[in-house]
Structures are given as structure tokens and as C-alpha cells.
Amino acid sequence: MYRNLDAGKIIETVRQLRNRIQERFPQASLGRVAEDLLHVAEKAAVKAEAISHPFLPFRIGIGVLVIAFLALMAWIAFHVKISAQVDRLTEFFQGMDAAMNMVLLIGGAIFSLFTLEVRLKRNRALKLLHELRSLAHIVDMHQLTKDPETITGKGSTASSPKRMMTRFELSRYLDYCSEMSSLIGKIAALYVQKYDDPVVLSAVDQIEDLTSSLSRKTWQKIMINNNLQMEAVG
């Protein structure tokens, strides 16, 4: 059943896209961006799987530390001599307040230890997702100057980008950018496929919204370019 993203299929799709870009545009820097995306996809497949699994040595170490800490507290409780008489009621309440503060501190420390693994995994995933977000913006920068309406070079100035592509090549170039944006979103989704963390899931949703928006913007250029090409033929 096709209910999960196949990391191997995503990597193969990115590899094929890289080959297509480098074969059609061997001098374009977009091919090098696709090469970087392939490395990120390969790393994501391994990192996402590692993040989804419990880190047993870490959990065992925390368990041993907590048991040792509780054993120490029990030893102190049994060996500290407490006076049977309390001179004043205020002293009793002061002692109770100190004991409650100690319990709260110990409880907070134990809770922090048990959530440490979650926080470490979350920070690791967010750092990897930030890399994907940066790649999405880099892809967008590569299509930024590819304006279908100025491909003929008319109205250009000395500082205008060089227009070296035909309309067919421009359409293929923009299509590659759209595919890369879509694949970045799919790679990001690998990190939450087996790891249910609300913060990481929110970050992945933001990346998917970003890549979908960039892809729509690219496809608008493709449609304009195709319409202009049909008008030229007609």
C-alpha cells in the first residue's frame, strides 16, 4: 500500500532531475543546485530514520541517573536525624516549605531529563529543515530573472540579465525549478513521516506552503511563456 513516502524513490527522482538539468543546461548553475539537493535528500533519508527511532543509550543513561539520584535522596531521608519536638509552629511550616521546594526542584529536574531527548531531536530536525528552506529560496533566485516577456531582449538596458534561452529552453528551465521546489517539500515531509512532533510538523508545513507558493509563481511564468510562444507561431 502507498501510504508512506519512499525516501529511495525521492532520491532517485532528484537524481534524475539533476541529470536532466545538467544534460540540457550543462553550464547553468541550476545543475549545481540540483547536485546539492541530491546530497540533502540522501542525508535526509538517513537523518529522518535516525530521528524517528529512540536513542536507547541516552534513555538508559537518564534512567540510571534518575535512579541514582532517587537512591541518594532516600539515603539522606533515612540518615538525617529529625528532632521530635518543634519549638514553634512557624519552624514546622518553614521546614515543610523547604521540603516542598526540594520536591518541586527534583521533579522539574527529572522532567527536564526525560524531555531532553525530545528537545535534542527537535533542534536537530529544525536545523535540517532550515537547510531545505534556504534551498527553496536559492531555487527561487535562479528563476527570478527568467521573465518570458523580455526573452527577446527588447527594451533591455546595460544592466539587464543576458537573455540566451529560446522560449522552449525557458519553459524547460522554469519547469525544472518548479520540480525542484516540489521535491524540497517532499524531502521536508520525510522528517515528520515517523516523528510526531508538533513544532517540527509546523516547520514542515511552512516549508510546503513556501515551496507550493514558489512553484505556483514559476508555473505562472510557464503559462505566460507558452501563450507568447503560441501567439508568435499564430
Image (spheres, rainbow, N blue to C red):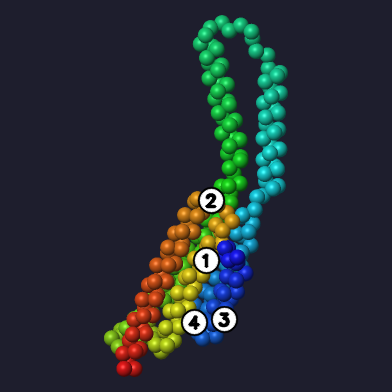
Image disc number at residue 19 = 3
Q: Earlier in the sequence, mark 1 or mark 3?
A: 3
Give above or below for 170 relative to 9: below
Where residue 81 sits in the image (x, y, percent)?
A: 68, 14
What residue is disc 1 on?
Answer: 186
Q: What amino acid is found at the position of numbered circle 1 in the picture?
A: Lys
Q: Secondary structure at mark 2?
A: loop
Where residue 209 sits in the image (x, y, percent)?
A: 42, 63
Q: Earlier in the sequence, mark 4 or mark 3?
A: 3
The answer to whether one can see residue 135 in this image is no
What residue is disc 2 on?
Answer: 197
Mark 2, other Cα within 10 Å: few <14 / some 14–19 / many ≥20: some
Q: Residue at x 44, y 86 (%)?
A: 169
Q: Secondary structure at mark 1?
A: helix
Rounded to the nearest angstrom, the CA distance separating label 1 from label 3 is 19 Å
Q: Earlier in the sequence, mark 4 or mark 1?
A: 4
Looking at the image, residue 167 sits to the left or right of residue 134; the answer is left
Looking at the image, residue 26 sits to the left or right of residue 221; the answer is right
- Nearer to the camera, 195 or 129: 195
Rounded to the nearest angstrom, the CA distance separating label 3 from label 2 is 35 Å
Rounded to the nearest angstrom, the CA distance separating label 4 from label 3 is 12 Å
Q: Quadrant of residue 3?
A: bottom right
What residue is disc 4 on?
Answer: 28
Rounded to the nearest angstrom, the CA distance separating label 1 from label 2 is 17 Å
Q: What amino acid is found at the position of numbered circle 2 in the picture?
A: Asp
Quarter of the image for the N terminus: give it.
Answer: bottom right
Q: Residue at x 69, y 33 (%)?
A: 67
Q: What amino acid is found at the position of numbered circle 4 in the picture?
A: Ala
Give above or below for 234 relative to 226: below
